[in-house]
Image (cartoon, helix red, strand yellow):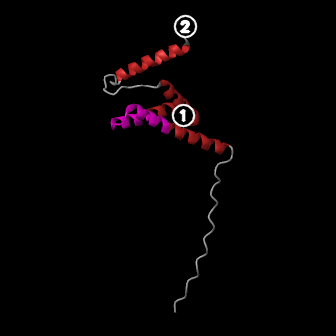
């Protein structure tokens, strides 16, 4: 069987993830760390296209942070990651829909200016 570029990339990412776990002292935790590389890379790509390129690493960091906090609070780690990924995908989809509407000119029109206030009543003379 011939090794493909995809296989080499997957192997490199698996090795990097293992090294990163060791460096961050995550390898010996009671909670297993499962990394869905494809889901993380897909999310990063979506963030880069929907927001800006620098949003890719920022998005994945915040998703990981949120999932870590949830897992630290007792949530199932896999469920915490899935929930953070899903919430972020919803936000990205909403942003893309808004941007598409805005570029099509279908964005909500700006509010009309308020009508001028009625003039104040003249003062009543004192008797």
Where does the image place residue 12, in percent across and percent down from the top left? Answer: 47, 16
Query: For the point 43% across and 25% down, which residue is it?
Result: 35
Residue 25 lies left or right of residue 89; in this view the side is left
Q: Residue at x 35, y 20 (%)?
A: 22
Q: Which mark, by number, is residue 47?
A: 1
Magenta-colored stretch includes residue 76: yes
Q: Rate crowding at label 1 as few (under 14), some (14 to 19) or many (20 or more) other CA atoms within 10 Å.
A: many
Q: Which mark is residue 2?
A: 2
Q: 91 above or below 114?
A: above
Q: What residue do we see at 41% from left, 25% from top?
A: 34
Q: Which comes sooner in the sequence, label 2 or label 1?
A: 2
Q: Which residues are magenta?
A: 62-87
The majority secondary structure of the magenta stretch comes to helix
User: Would you say residue 36 sits in the magenta stretch?
Assistant: no
* Mark 1 residue element: helix
**Nearer-the-camera pick, 87 or 26:** 87
Position of 114 with respect to 10 (left or right) is right
Location of residue 4 (image quadrant):
top right
Residue 127 against residue 23 in the figure, above or below: below
Label of residue 57 in the image: none
In front: 121, or 76? 76
Residue 43 falls left or right of residue 100: left
Instruction: Bin the neighbour count of mark 2 within 10 Å (Cα to Cα): few under 14, some 14-19, many 20 and up.
Output: few
Where's residue 57, x and y in %?
48, 30
Q: Can you say which quadrant of the picture contains the N terminus?
A: top right
56 relative to 123, above or below: above
């Amino acid at each position: 069987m011939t090794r493909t570029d995809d296989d080499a990339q997957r192997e490199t990412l698996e090795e990097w993830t293992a090294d990163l776990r060791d460096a961050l002292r995550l390898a010996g935790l009671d909670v297993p760390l499962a990394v869905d590389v494809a889901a993380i890379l897909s999310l990063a790509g979506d963030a880069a296209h929907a927001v800006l390129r620098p949003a890719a690493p920022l998005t994945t960091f915040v998703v990981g942070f949120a999932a870590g906090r949830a897992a630290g609070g007792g949530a199932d780690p896999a469920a915490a990651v899935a929930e953070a990924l899903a919430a972020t995908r919803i936000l990205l989809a909403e942003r893309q829909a808004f941007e598409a509407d805005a570029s099509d000119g279908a964005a909500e029109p700006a509010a009309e200016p308020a009508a001028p206030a009625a003039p104040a009543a003249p003062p009543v003379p004192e008797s």
